[in-house]
Amino acid sequence: MAARRFPVEAGHVLAFTRALGGADPEGGLPADGDAAPPTFAIASAQFDPDYPLRPRPGAPWHGSGSDAGLVREGAGGLHAEQHFVYHRPVRVGDVLAATIRPGKEWEKQGRSGRLRFREQVTEFRDRAGELVVTARSVSVQRETP
Amino acid sequence: MSGLRAGDLTVGQTFETVIVEDLRRTQIVQYAGASGDYNPLHTDEIYATKIAGYPSVFAHGMLTMGLTGQAIAGLTGTENLLRFGVRFTAQVWPGDTLTVRTSVARIADGEDGPAAEFSVSTVNAEGREVMSGYAHARLAG
């Protein structure tokens, strides 16, 4: 799934910039039209209704509580690569729509077993349908023998 | 708007920026909240150590990329970035201090005027590379 509607909100850009150690802008909030940090498109996860790495009401969560948590099967592996192509900067006030398509898959023999790499391409378009950012991520998972 | 001019750069020139000193778990949690990625490997010490078998929680790769991106954007101007891509090569742990080295690999004349290609390397205090990649940015003429 992907974020069908990803509004680039000033408060969200502020929180994201703070998490990256950035100082608050003059006036306290980014202004409409200000460029968001270069990796901000990743925060579209907040607007993906099915994003798996967020606890949700009524669904079990694998982190610790009264016990230490659970091993989660097929959690998607570790993030191996991330690439962004900027057709223009993401700006406060944009409303983007993301579409995801699978990319290449390949395997490699690692020191501790076979590694499976999976690519995913996400296109972010603005309200006019113009491409803003193309994101390509690669995840890696160890094959269980 | 910050930006670089083609005349300011030479191939091989390297910029060094410390992007985080003594990374705190709270900053990892702050990034989880802002990005929406609450993976307990990054946010839950008990899960990360007892269930997943790591020595502690570790930073999201995207936190390292985000910190590195801020340093590059500070150099080139966010508006001028054309491409930014990385491979994550080692984990980043609480307590780490990270430095980005951004080196001019190539200066080319693109369709929209001059552009620079930078190679990007983020290293920890032991000098181990935790992320490597590239960034392309438009330059002022």
Image: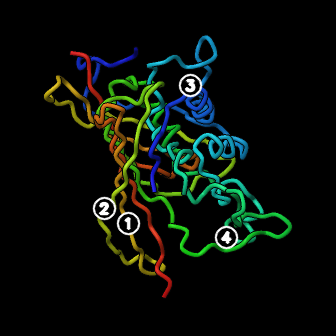
**Which chain letter matches label 2?**
A
- Inter-mark Cα distance, 2 to 4: 28 Å
Residue matched to label 1: A118
Q: Is the residue B49 above or below the residue A99 in the image?
A: below
For marks 2 and 1, the one nearer the N-term is 2
- Report in which chain the residue with disc 1 lies: A
Which residue is located at x 57 percent, y 50 percent?
B126
Quadrant hosting residue B14 = top left
- Residue type marked 3: Ala
Per the model, the C-alpha gap separating discs 1 and 4 is 22 Å
Q: CA distance from mark 4 to mark 3?
A: 36 Å
* Callouts 2 and 4 in the same chain: no
Residue ID for mark 4: B52
Residue sitting nearer the eye, A8 or B133: A8
Given the current orientation, which residue lies at the most extreme top position? A27
Give the colour scheme shown: rainbow
- Circle 1 — which element? strand
What residue is pinned by disc 2? A103
- Mark linked to residue A10: 3
Q: Are marks 2 and 4 in contact (CB under 8 Å)?
A: no
